[in-house]
Image (tube, helix red, strand yellow):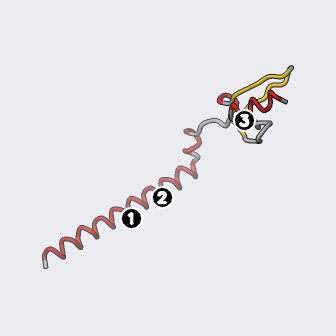
Amino acid sequence: TVMGWLIRFILFSLLITLVVRSLVRLFAGIVEGATGGGARNATPATKMVKDPVCGTYVVPSKALTATRGNQTAWFCSPECQHAWQRR
């Protein structure tokens, strides 16, 4: 029937479109990886510091801090910060 043929044609067209699109993206990724193209858009690495109370690593610019004498410590949460200050 014409309706069955039309449905098969539409499904086959969708399948071919998905396969071609997947292959194009795959090869684009391979070329980008081989040429180092992704490195230009990468953000620079940030050194992380360890919370002295729970051991979680945090980004210094986003962490809570406390100072004791000349020692500065970075914390993941107010609870860790208060626990360190109570010591």
In the figure, is residue 14 to the left or right of 79? left
Q: Nearer the viewer, residue 36 or 5?
A: 5
Is tag 2's residue or tag 1's residue first in the polypeptide sequence? 1
Residue occupying image coordinates x 28% and y 66%: 13
10 Å crowding of disc 2: few (<14), some (14-19), many (20+): few
Residue at x-position 43% and y-position 61% = 23
- Would you say 66 lies left or right of 5 here? right
- Report the residue marked by disc 3: 47
Give amino acid for label 1.
Val
- Are the residues at dot 3 and dot 2 in contact (C-beta closer than 8 Å)? no
* Label whose residue precedes the other's in the sequence (3 or 2): 2
**Is 9 positioned to the left or the right of 61 in the image?**
left
Q: Earlier in the sequence, mark 1 or mark 3?
A: 1
Q: Quadrant of residue 16?
A: bottom left
Mark 2, residue position: 26
Image spot of residue 26 (x, y percent): 48, 58
Identified by mark 3, the residue type is Lys
